[in-house]
Amino acid sequence: MTRTLIAFSLLSALSSAPSNASSEDLNAQFKQHYSAYQTAVKSDNKAQIVATAKQAYDLGQQLYGSHHINTVNLAINYADALDNKNTEKLRVLENTLKIVENHHKDNLQASFDVTLPIAKLTFKDEKRAALNSLKEIGHKAEAQKDYELASVAYLEAIKLAATSRKTASTARTLIRRTDEINKAHLPETAIQRLSTDIWVAALDEAKNRKKAAISRLEHIVEIFDENLEFDHPFELTAHSRLVNLYEKTRQSDKATKHCLAIAKMVPWQDTQQQEPLYRVHPIYPTSMARRMKSGWVRLQFTVSKSGFVKDIEVLESSDSGFEKASIKAMEQWRYAPKFENGEPVEAKSTVQLDYKIS
């Protein structure tokens, strides 16, 4: 749960606070400090976020009691504000989890909101325990037919499991299970389902099932084009991966429409070096490798209306021995073309390729 959502639940509950004079003073103090916390969050002032979150949490314990769900949310806000290296963060979260287990065990959302940051903090040293805690919430959510929370819990477990070879098999198993839940219970337009689709496509690509990955990613693009009237990072990711997959499978013509789509979502910046959507690394020249020479080549080129690279020129280089390999690699790159007045146009850009002997 984000700070914004937690904030809303707290403010909506203020009217239920005790009405005696002492409590009114405490209520006023809490409102003041919580408002300061919200202001700090909006301005992204990290030092103030920590300080005001701590003050709101301390006052919330007095106002609501240490076991109240509002206090739980305040504790999550405070822990979230702390740096991961701060031991206070894990201590607050673990104490809060005990409160949730003892007093709000049926509140799976609260359990998840506390369990997730604990899992992230402890995963490095306690991989299985961290994953099992998230999987347990997923199982409980399924039992309660809260399929969206189950999908969220499983996906967060997947993200953690995928970062380690030791738990990669767990990630693969959970991806398939989450995909099954999404297809059976969540609408195609649900952002949670689209998020999982991105991971399923990544798994297919990693397993060299490129056709399946392309099909999944094209479906994501189709959902956005037909049903969602806004741009989203998932859509951008799908387009970008499709460019890579089509180029890898030598289907450059099919990659073009995705280059154009990205160009509409991410405007061309003449003042900075453009980022390629697909690149082929140059082969280190044998003559340079034998001489143990490192070097660089700076190139200027034109990005066509379809995102292809042409008219490559060497501006300068540390050694001419690197130039041929650089041009050969650049000829295979793809970019999002520049758009002017709603139409793609040719544009020049530059890049520097570095060669380093390790």
Image: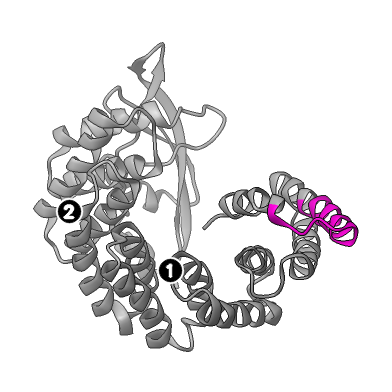
Q: Quick check: is 31 in the magenta stretch?
A: yes
Q: Quick check: is 282 in the magenta stretch?
A: no
In which quadrant will I find the C terminus?
Answer: bottom left
In this view of the protein, can residue 348 be seen by the observer? yes
User: In the rendered structure, which amino acid carries the disc numbered 2?
Assistant: Lys
Tell me where the magenta segment starts and ends, as one range.
Answer: 16-34
Q: Nearer the viewer, residue 99 or 350?
A: 99
Q: Nearer the viewer, residue 325 or 140?
A: 140
Q: Residue, x 12% and y 44% (percent of image)?
A: 250
Label at residue 108: 1
Secondary structure of the residue carrying numbered label 1: helix
Q: Position of residue 302 (x, y in %)?
A: 37, 27
Secondary structure of the residue carrying numbered label 2: helix
The picture quadrant where one finds residue 92 is: bottom right
Q: Residue, x 77% and y 61% (percent of image)?
A: 56
User: In the rendered structure, which amino acid carries the disc numbered 1?
Assistant: Leu
142 up-or-down from 299: above or below: below
The residue that mark 2 highlights is: 183
Q: Position of residue 201 (x, y in %)?
A: 21, 55
Residue extending farthest front:
20
Q: Residue, x 41% and y 48% (percent of image)?
A: 320
Q: Is residue 230 left or right of residue 269?
A: left
Residue extending farthest top:
341
Disc 1 or 2, which lies upstream in sequence? Answer: 1
90 up-or-down from 148: above or below: below
Q: Is residue 317 left or right of residue 196?
A: right
Residue density around tag 1, few if under 14, some if 14–19, many if 20 or more, within 10 Å: many
Colour scheme employed for the rendering of this structure: one colour
